[in-house]
Image (tube, helix red, strand yellow):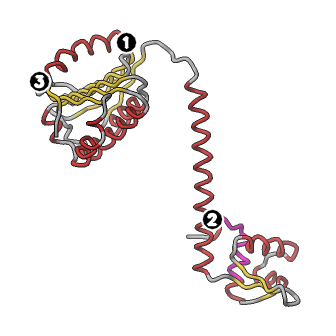
Amino acid sequence: MANLRDLGLSEYEARAYRSLLSTGPTTAKELSRASDVPMGRIYDVLNSIEQYNLVRSQTASRPKKYVAVEPSTALDRLLEDKKRELEEKADQYESIVDDLANELDAAEPVEEQFWTAAVGPEETIDLLLERLAAADRDIVMVSSHPSPQWDMQAVSEEINAQLEDAIDRGVSVDLLMTREMVSSMSEEVGRRYRETLQQRDDFDVRTHDDVTGSFNIIDGVEICIQVPNPLSSGEAFGMIDLKDPEFAANVHDEFVPRWEEAEPLEF
């Protein structure tokens, strides 16, 4: 059940506010009895919920009396306080991430072969987006056929957003697709390509229908290869990510002639 404590109040503060709603204007002593908040704590509790703007006090009366702010107003104020607190926390975490990113990026990368794999549509897309986000210099993408088990509209928009981020940080992108792959893209991706990406010198898209596989070369040293499902033609089974400069160079050498034969994409 929802509780005032979920919005930041302590148990005593929640008791005091609820009791004030029932008692109407009352003194601290009377509220202590009604709410079961110890008399030794009641003034601190009242001061606290007064700072939350949940109660109003009548200082002219002797003894001083307190009255609860209407619930709708009180809850709105607690909600705004929580939102402000979360925004401050988010800013704090973003600052920490920026500091750590600079610190961790300063470390020398380990230059050795390494491979990993993802199986399943969600895991495959997560791995691809992760590796695109890691690119520092250049990305080569080759896409042959849309995979039927993917939501191509959502996937293409996620990949498009990741490519835009890469270009903004100085990464060049060469994208080779079949016409079938182009037609599977969402209207939103097409619009953003026309209005934003098509104008960028470091982003180039070409089409060639003699493309049978899907892979991505990252910074010339890492390659993500989509693995087709051996039991279902056209479906993606998973993805292998391999860091091997020599192998990546060999794949790039095979890519170059097809790229030179391809036609620039124009919507």
With respect to residue 238, does 137 lie above or below? above
Question: Is residue 169 shown in magenta?
Answer: no
Q: Amino acid at mark 1?
A: Pro
Magenta stretch: give its range. 7-19
How far is mark 3 from mark 2, CA to CA? Answer: 59 Å
With respect to residue 19, does 228 lie above or below? above
Please give the residue where the numbered disc 3 appears in the rendered image.
210
Residue located 22% across and 44% down the image: 190
* Label whose residue precedes the other's in the sequence (1 or 2): 2
Q: Position of residue 23 (x, y in %)?
A: 72, 89
Q: Amino acid at mark 3?
A: Asp
Circle 2 residues within 10 Å: few <14, some 14–19, many ≥20: some
Circle 3 residues within 10 Å: few <14, some 14–19, many ≥20: few
Q: Are marks 1 and 2 in contact (CB under 8 Å)?
A: no
Residue 245, numbered label: 1
With respect to residue 77, does 228 lie above or below? above
Left or right? Give the position of 170 relative to 254.
right
